[in-house]
């Protein structure tokens, strides 16, 4: 029995026993009933003590368990997950423990690393010779330039640890209040609902590592391998969040039905304010702008007005008081000429679902890598994106560049 049910039963027995003592003297039958109730109350008190002990123990253990799980995730080595497959041996340590946990939870077999510990694309010893010798300077490592990753920074909500499809109920319309005259009837109204669904979609990176790099590099190679492959996957996912086609990729913001549109063919303070008004009439408070470098340059070189001393539309990284995120991930629109695109919206209305284990698979026999003494490494992560309220965004796709 649950603790609350035990206490309720005990209280009922106490009340029953007290009612027997209401008279001046107990009859033999009442005495027998009282003795029986006394034994039942004593038994329930023992049950209550045991249930309370277990409840307290569960409460005390919740913190340490989470801490232990976080410590396990932090101890997982991506390089070990790769090296054990290159060397044809079983995974060891934290990698083995985490992979067993995933197998028990999902039934999938393989070598896994948690998303929090994951990040990888690699270098061969030819292109990364500076990280094999003893005089290793990770602080001077120059990584590849990446398109700016902006969507999570703009406030998209991230749901982690998902299993299977995720269905989120969404209210479309609400009740309507009405003023009526004396004797007039109210018109019936009601709420309508639909649903938002996040489905597992897969994004992967395939890259090459040299055997010498895996076997001889200093421990700092772990962070370099993580950082680079992480950037590859994150960049692909960020692009899908913005412009995904909804077929293999998640359906991106720019392709989501119901997103509002605006006209910025003539850039001016008035057209910018008109774009903001579209969200205002929908009771949406925008959090940021999103655009490409070309469109950002046009904003930064367009005056608010012809009045002497007037500022530019984009100044100090803000437009109309809101931050502007700039990335090459925002594509141009059309051809001959290509037009720039600008997005305004409440980016907390975007949901990112992450099924949070990344599977690492090593193929030491891939033909091209094998000839060079390298191995191919494949990393797969599973995630999806959905826009909860499309009307919380407005897009202008006609900015002259």
Image (cartoon, grey):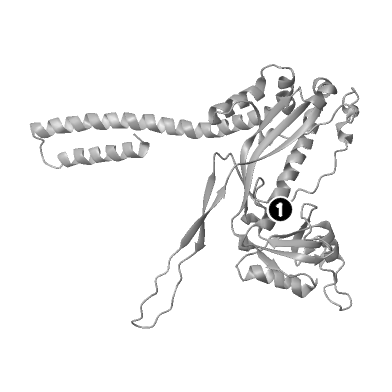
Q: Where the N terminus falls, by quadrant?
A: top left
Measured along the vertical axis of the image, is residue 401 above or below residue 19? below
Measured along the vertical axis of the image, is residue 222 above or below residue 215? below
Mark 1 residue crowding within 10 angstroms, few (<14) / some (14–19) / many (20+): many
Q: Is residue 293 visible?
A: yes
Q: Picture coordinates of residue 86 (x, y %)? A: 74, 20
Q: Which residue is mark 1?
A: 243
- Say left or right for 340 vs 84: right
Q: Residue at x 62, y 71 (%)?
A: 281
Q: Residue furthest bottom?
A: 182
Q: Residue at x 57, y 27 (%)?
A: 103
- Say left or right for 57 vs 228: left
Q: Give the camera-side residue of 191 and 340.
A: 340
Q: Residue at x 29, y 32 (%)?
A: 44
Measured along the vertical axis of the image, is residue 199 above or below residue 194? above
Q: Give the camera-side residue of 259 and 306.
A: 259
């Amino acid at each position: 029995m649950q603790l609350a049910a035990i206490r309720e039963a005990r209280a009922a027995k106490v009340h029953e026993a007290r009612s027997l003592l209401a008279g001046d003297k107990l009859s033999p039958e009442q005495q027998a009933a009282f003795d029986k109730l006394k034994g039942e109350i004593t038994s329930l008190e023992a049950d209550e003590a045991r249930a309370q002990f277990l409840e307290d123990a569960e409460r005390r253990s919740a913190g340490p368990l989470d801490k232990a799980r976080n410590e396990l995730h932090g101890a997982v080595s991506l390089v070990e997950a790769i090296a054990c497959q290159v060397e044809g041996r079983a995974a060891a340590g934290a990698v083995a423990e985490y992979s067993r946990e995933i197998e028990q939870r999902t039934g999938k077999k393989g070598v896994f690393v948690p998303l929090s510990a994951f990040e990888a694309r690699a270098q061969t010893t030819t292109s990364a010779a500076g990280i094999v010798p003893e005089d290793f300077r990770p602080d001077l490592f120059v990584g590849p330039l990446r398109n700016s990753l902006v969507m999570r920074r703009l406030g998209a909500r991230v749901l982690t640890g998902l299993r299977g499809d995720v269905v989120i109920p969404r209210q479309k319309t609400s009740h309507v209040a009405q003023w009526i005259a004396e004797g007039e009837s109210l018109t019936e109204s009601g709420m309508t609902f639909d649903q938002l669904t996040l489905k597992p979609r897969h994004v992967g990176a395939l890259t090459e590592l040299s055997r010498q790099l895996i076997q001889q590099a200093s421990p700092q190679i772990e962070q370099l391998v993580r950082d680079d492959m992480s950037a590859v996957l994150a960049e692909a996912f960020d692009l899908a969040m913005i412009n995904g086609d909804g077929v293999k990729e998640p359906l991106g913001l720019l392709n989501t039905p119901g997103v509002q549109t605006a006209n910025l063919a003539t850039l001016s303070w008035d057209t910018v304010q008109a774009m903001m008004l579209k969200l205002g009439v929908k009771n949406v408070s925008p959090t940021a702008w999103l655009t490409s470098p070309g469109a950002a340059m046009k904003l930064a070189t367009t005056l608010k007005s012809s009045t002497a001393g007037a500022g530019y539309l984009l100044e100090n990284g803000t437009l109309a008081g809101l931050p502007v995120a700039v990335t090459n991930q925002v594509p141009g629109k059309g051809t001959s000429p290509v037009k720039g695109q600008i997005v305004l919206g409440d980016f907390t209305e975007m949901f990112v679902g992450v099924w949070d284990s990344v599977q690492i698979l090593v193929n030491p026999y891939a033909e091209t890598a094998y000839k060079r003494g390298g191995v191919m490494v494949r990393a797969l992560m599973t995630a999806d994106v959905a826009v909860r309220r499309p009307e919380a965004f407005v897009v202008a796709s006609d900015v002259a560049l």
